[in-house]
Amino acid sequence: MDLNNKYQNMSSDSDSKSSSLNSKIEQEESESNSPTKSRRSTSSTSNEIPTVGDIKLRNKLSENLTSGRSDDPPLLPGEKVQGVARDVTYLCPFSGPARGWLSVTNYKLYFKSLERDTQLIIEVPLGVVSRVEKVGGQSSRGENSYGIELFCKDMRNLRFGHKQENHSRRNVFEKLQQYAFPLSHSIPMFAFEYTEIFPENGWNVYEPMAELKRMGVPNDTWHITKLNDGHDLCETYPAILAVPAGATDEIIRNAAAFRSRGRIPVLSWLHSESQATITRASQPLVGVGGKRCRDDERYTQLIIDANAQSHKLYIMDARPSANAIANKAKGGGYEPEDAYQNAELIFLDIHNIHVMRESLRKLKGYTFGYIFSCGIFIFNC
């Protein structure tokens, strides 16, 4: 066997640790001035058996390349390792514990198992972490009863067991707290540390005029206005807007004054054949007194008139009707059907964020087979 060629092939794919070991091999061989050196230099034509030292060193290199013991996870441009913990156990609720090593970068948590036929790798972008908690204390007994648990926004709960004698939990916990919540620790978000160079300027990926032209605007029924060029009309809308062709600047301004934060109905999507549209808007400022705005009503009718194949407009209000009615007390409200002719108001009954959060909590419980007791996750295995 040509061990020299085999050694070169392995070292060509190795990392910096492998290169260091390579240098060590050459140094030891040079210092020893043994027959090994002359055999290596003629290995392509020699069939002599290498020394035991050669085999041990090369086996060590091979183990380093294949065992996955490198402490460096794959890194993105600008990503840096902040902390590493060895001999960590991932407590998988499905396939059982997996020993490995864990690292925390300024972007992610990375775990790689060591004792599995099929290697287990877990990557968690720290932006998806909602909470980090320590599990167990100095008096904890039992294997893997001492460690860290991550609560993620994507419904995952990940628990890692640490050995108390290694004192690795504290460093990992602190690094997770810092880089999962960078603004609370005066640390730059990774998005601003990411240094990959792209061939295209990301700020130009969305070009509003090109997108409107793709939908066939301007045309006979829809035109483009730059009335919001300085974002004076609506600070949350783009500078270029598609509005009904019959809407004058005066109608647009008056309608914007009657909408929450100036968000008048503007074109979001246009079907190229049927001319059906989706427009988006905020709630009208009707209030308890039931105020009306003639220009807002006229503007809405122009949207209906823009589609010759339909003479009805469906207004989809995402809120429950009770919430919409309650908003009248705050000066908001909804479009009364007697004021907006040819329009039908439909409430989608999507509740507020607190109700949605509770719904997500229940979905998490049903989907992942967990039960909840006093706000604590318990594996239902």
Image (spheres, rainbow, N blue to C red):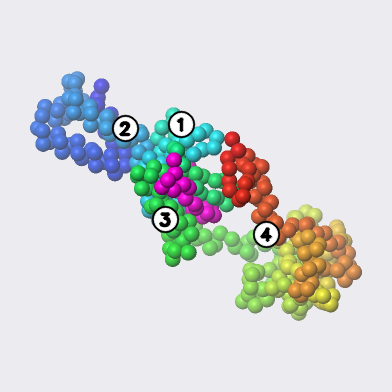
**In the current view of this chain or complex, which residue is farthest to the left?**
33
Query: Picture quarter containing residue 246?
Result: bottom right
Q: Mark 2 vs mark 3: which is more N-terminal?
A: 2
Residue assigned mark 3: 174
Q: Mark 1 vs mark 3: which is more N-terminal?
A: 1
**Amino acid tagged 3:** Glu
**Amino acid tagged 1:** Thr
Query: Is residue 323 rendered to the left or right of residue 20?
Result: right
Q: Mark 4 vs mark 1: which is more N-terminal?
A: 1
- Could you tell me which secondary element the residue under label 4 belongs to? helix
Say which of marks 1 and 3 sits in front.
Answer: 3
Q: Residues within 10 Å of mark 1 (few under 14, many from 20)?
A: few
The one nearer the camera, 355 or 212, is: 355
Instruction: Look at the image and tell me in which quarter the N terminus lies.
Output: top left
- Could you tell me which secondary element the residue under label 2 belongs to? helix
Query: Looking at the rendered structure, which numbered label has been put on residue 353?
Result: 4
**Amino acid tagged 2:** Glu
Say which of marks 2 and 3 sits in front.
Answer: 3
- Could you tell me which secondary element the residue under label 3 belongs to? helix
C-alpha span from label 1 to label 3: 31 Å
Is 125 a magenta residue?
yes
Say which of marks 4 and 3 sits in front.
Answer: 3
